[in-house]
């Protein structure tokens, strides 16, 4: 599965206005989440050099106050020069502490963390996320899951058109992950 993603800083833009504009064109708020991501690195392979990521995510739905869910995710290297499209594999796991200890036993060490509040809106196959990232500020992520490489270019164009419709300047776009923006801004 390919995660086709565009990301843009919302500096000097109103997240409320963007949410309102998105709702006017058919997006519906699905969730308000707190996501805490813990990124790992291995002894034999430095994911910073290979443009990959191994992450544990604690995800709490702030709407219902239930217990956090935990996911493990692998993201492959970026696949084009415009978007942040990557191969992604993700699955839920039972408990954060146990999964962390399992990864550490295999030689992976926690290196960095990212904490954000996310408002997730959906319309058809597109997910629009308004993120408030601790230490970074507000960002917009637009995502489509594509089943094959053939669908990537049309998905990127669809997301670029939506970015324009929401009046988010393309100059605000970044291909960097929140991890890169927080810890490696010079790369």
Image (cartoon, rainbow, N blue to C red):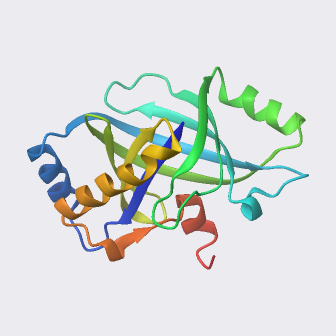
Direction from residue 47 to residue 181 in the image, left or right: left
> What's the residue at 84%, 39% (across, down)?
104
Picture coordinates of residue 133, whole percent (x, y): 44, 57
Task: Kindly give the residue lying farthest to the bottom in the view shown.
Answer: 186
Task: Kindly give the residue lying farthest to the left in the view shown.
Answer: 24
Give the vertical position of 97 relative to 10 (above or below): above
Direction from residue 111 to residue 32 in the image, left or right: left
Relative to the observer, which residue lies in front, 46 or 163? 163
Direction from residue 77 to residue 5 in the image, left or right: left
Task: Kindly give the residue lying farthest to the front in the view shown.
Answer: 150
Picture coordinates of residue 152, whole percent (x, y): 45, 49
> What's the residue at 24%, 55% (across, down)?
162
Picture coordinates of residue 102, whole percent (x, y): 81, 30
State which quarter of the image contains the C terminus.
Answer: bottom right
Relative to the observer, which residue lies in front, 106 or 63? 106
> What's the residue at 54%, 36% (across, down)?
1
Picture coordinates of residue 89, whole percent (x, y): 61, 35
> What's the residue at 37%, 64% (across, down)?
8
Give the vertical position of 105 relative to 44 (above or below): above
Q: Quadrant of residue 146?
A: top left
Give the vertical position of 147 relative to 95 (above or below): below
**Across the whole image, how many numbered discs are drawn on residues?**
0
């Amino acid at each position: 599965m390919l995660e086709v993603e565009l990301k843009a800083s919302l500096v000097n833009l109103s997240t409320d206005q963007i949410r309102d504009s998105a709702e006017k064109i058919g997006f519906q708020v699905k969730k308000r989440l707190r996501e805490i991501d813990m990124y790992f690195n291995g002894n034999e392979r430095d994911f910073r050099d290979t443009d990959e990521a191994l992450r544990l995510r604690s995800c709490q739905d702030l709407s219902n106050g239930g217990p956090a869910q935990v996911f493990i995710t692998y993201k492959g290297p970026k696949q084009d020069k415009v978007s942040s499209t990557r191969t992604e594999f993700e699955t839920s796991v039972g408990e954060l502490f146990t999964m962390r200890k399992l990864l550490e036993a295999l030689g992976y060490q926690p290196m960095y963390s990212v904490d954000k509040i996310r408002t997730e809106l959906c319309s058809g196959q597109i997910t629009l996320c308004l993120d408030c990232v601790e230490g970074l500020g507000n960002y917009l992520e637009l995502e489509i899951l594509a089943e094959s490489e053939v669908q990537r270019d049309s998905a990127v164009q669809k997301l670029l058109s939506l970015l324009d419709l929401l009046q988010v300047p393309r100059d605000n776009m970044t291909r960097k992950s929140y991890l890169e923006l927080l810890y490696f801004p010079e790369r």
